[in-house]
Image (cartoon, rainbow, N blue to C red):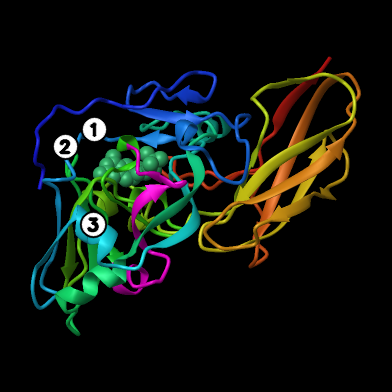
C-alpha cells in the first residue's frame, strides 16, 4: 500500500560524475568501473535503475501483503514485524542489469538498441540483510498448487517479475531491509526489496508492497515484453541467470602512465561460478589472471594481473570462463532488446 503520496524524486542520492555515469534518462546511473574500492560496491556509488521516480514511502504506514491462489490466507506484515519477528540473514550478492553494456553491444553490431544506453556500470555487489522470502511465505500457508511467486513494487507502474516457487524458497532469496549495513537507501528500494541470487537485476523488485503466490505461471510485461531474449523465429525467452562476463577497473578509454602496475577487475557468471579469467595484451598470447575470490555463485569474483606496459596505444582483452567451461564469446548473438551482452571487450589503453 502506498501511504504518503509524496511525489517521488527521480533519484534521491547524489550522483556525482566522480562516482557515477549518467545514462541520460534522468533515472538511471551506472557505477564508474574505476571507482570500486573493495569487494562491495558502496551505497553512494551503487548503480540505480529506476523505471519511475524513487517513491518516498513512510515505514510507519507501509505494510507488506502476501496473498494469492497459492496460499491458504493473506498475511500482512508491518515494517516492525520484518525486523523483529524473523531471524535476519546477510548475504553478499551481485546485482547486474540484463541491459548492462547495451551501448557496447550496439557498437559491436553497428545498430542501436532501444532501452537504457548502459556502458559497463550497471552491476554492483552489496551485503544484503533481510528475511528469507520463504519465512514470509510460510505463515500464509503455501498450498500444493503454488507455482510462482511475484513481488510487486509500489513505484508508478507497479514493477513486478515472477519467479518459480523453488527459486523463491531458496535460502538466499531475501526480502532485504539493509544494504552494506545501512538501512536500505530510498533509491535501492526502502523499505524492502527482493534479492534473487544470480538473476538479472529486474527480478530484484524494489519498494515491495505485495507478494503474490500464484497457482499458475504468471505473464506480466517484465517476462513477456521486457527482460526477454527476442530472436527471429524463436519464442521470447525470459532472462533469469545472466551469462559470464567481466569488468576491467579502468576508464574507457584508459590513459595510464608507463611503469609496472596491476590491472584489476571482477568477473561474474550469475547463478554459476567463475572458473577462470584470462587476459591478452594486443596480439600477445592469452595468459591466466590471478583470481582473488570469493569463489561463489551469485557473487562477482575479483581478479588481477601485473602489467608493465610500453608507451603507446594498447588493447587489453579479458575473458572469463564459467564453471561449465563456457568462455565469454568474441561476439554476442544478436537479440532485439540488446540484453545479456557478454563479448570479450577490446579495452583501449593509451600509455604515456
Ligand atoms: N519497483 C521496482 N523495482 C525494480 C526496478 C524498478 O524500476 N522498480 N528496476 C529493476 C531493475 S531493471 C534493476 S537492474 C534493479 C536495479 O537495482 P538498483 O537500482 O538498486 O541498482 O532493480 C530492479 N527492481
Ligand atoms: Mo535492469
Quick check: marks 3 and 2 in contact, CB under 8 Å? Answer: no
Residue 225 versus residue 139 in the image, above or below? above
* Residue that label 3 marks: 151
Residue 221 in percent (x, y) is at: 22, 49
The residue carrying mark 3 has its beta carbon less than 8 Å from ligand 1: no
**Distance Cα–Cα, label 1 vs label 3:** 17 Å
Quick check: marks 2 and 1 in contact, CB under 8 Å? Answer: yes
Q: Quadrant of residue 157?
A: top left
Q: Residue at x 57, y 33 (%)?
A: 108
Element class at badge 1: loop
Mark 1 or 3 closer to N-term?
A: 1
**Distance Cα–Cα, label 2 vs label 1:** 6 Å
Element class at badge 2: loop
Numbered range of the magenta stretch: 164-185
| Residue density around tag 1, few if under 14, some if 14–19, many if 20 or more, within 10 Å | some
| Residue density around tag 3, few if under 14, some if 14–19, many if 20 or more, within 10 Å | many
| Residue density around tag 2, few if under 14, some if 14–19, many if 20 or more, within 10 Å | few
* Residue that label 2 marks: 156
Q: Nearer the viewer, residue 199 or 77?
A: 77
| Rendered-image quadrant of the C terminus | top right
**Distance Cα–Cα, label 3 vs label 2:** 15 Å
The residue carrying mark 1 has its beta carbon less than 8 Å from ligand 1: yes
Mark 3 or 2 closer to N-term?
A: 3
Residue 305 in percent (x, y) is at: 81, 43
Residue 307 versus residue 196 in the image, above or below? above
Residue 12 in percent (x, y) is at: 31, 27
The reply, left or right, for residue 267 in relation to residue 163 is right
Q: Residue at x 43, y 23 (%)?
A: 15
Q: Is residue 137 magenta?
A: no
* Residue that label 1 marks: 52
Mark 2 or 1 closer to N-term?
A: 1
Residue 46 versus residue 255 in the image, above or below? below
Amino acid at each position: 500500500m502506498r501511504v504518503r503520496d509524496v511525489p517521488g524524486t527521480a533519484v534521491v542520492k547524489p550522483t556525482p560524475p566522480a562516482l557515477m555515469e549518467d545514462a541520460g534518462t534522468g533515472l538511471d546511473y551506472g557505477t564508474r568501473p574505476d571507482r570500486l574500492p573493495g569487494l562491495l560496491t558502496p551505497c553512494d556509488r551503487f548503480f540505480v535503475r529506476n523505471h519511475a521516480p524513487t517513491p518516498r514511502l513512510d515505514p510507519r504506514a507501509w505494510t507488506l501483503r502476501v496473498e494469492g491462489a497459492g496460499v491458504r490466507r493473506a498475511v500482512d506484515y508491518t515494517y516492525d514485524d520484518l525486523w523483529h519477528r524473523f531471524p535476519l540473514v546477510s548475504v553478499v550478492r551481485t546485482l547486474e542489469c540484463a541491459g548492462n553494456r547495451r551501448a557496447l553491444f550496439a557498437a559491436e553490431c553497428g545498430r542501436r538498441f532501444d532501452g537504457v544506453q548502459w556502458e559497463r556500470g550497471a552491476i554492483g555487489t552489496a551485503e544484503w540483510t533481510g528475511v528469507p522470502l520463504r519465512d514470509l511465505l510460510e505463515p500464509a500457508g503455501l498450498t500444493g498448487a503454488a507455482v510462482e511467486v511475484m513481488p510487486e513494487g509500489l513505484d508508478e507502474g507497479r514493477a513486478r517479475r515472477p519467479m518459480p516457487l523453488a527459486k523463491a524458497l531458496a535460502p538466499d532469496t531475501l526480502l532485504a531491509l539493509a544494504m552494506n549495513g545501512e538501512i536500505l537507501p530510498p533509491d535501492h528500494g526502502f523499505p524492502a526489496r527482493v534479492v534473487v541470487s544470480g538473476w538479472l537485476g529486474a527480478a530484484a523488485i524494489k519498494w515491495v508492497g505485495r507478494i503474490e503466490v500464484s497457482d499458475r505461471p504468471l505473464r506480466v510485461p517484465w517476462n513477456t515484453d521486457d527482460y526477454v531474449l527476442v530472436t527471429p523465429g524463436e519464442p521470447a525467452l525470459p532472462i533469469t541467470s545472466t551469462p559470464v562476463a567481466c569488468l576491467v577497473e579502468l576508464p574507457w578509454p584508459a590513459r595510464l602512465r608507463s611503469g609496472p602496475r596491476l590491472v584489476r577487475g571482477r568477473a561474474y557468471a550469475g547463478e554459476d561460478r567463475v572458473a577462470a579469467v584470462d587476459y591478452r595484451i594486443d596480439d600477445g598470447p592469452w595468459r591466466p589472471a590471478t583470481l582473488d575470490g570469493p569463489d561463489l555463485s551469485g557473487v562477482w569474483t575479483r581478479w588481477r594481473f601485473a602489467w608493465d606496459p610500453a608507451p603507446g596505444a594498447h588493447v587489453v582483452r579479458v575473458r572469463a570462463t564459467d564453471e561449465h567451461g563456457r568462455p565469454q564469446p568474441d561476439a554476442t548473438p544478436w537479440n532485439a532488446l540488446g540484453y545479456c551482452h557478454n563479448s570479450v571487450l577490446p579495452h583501449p589503453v593509451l600509455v604515456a
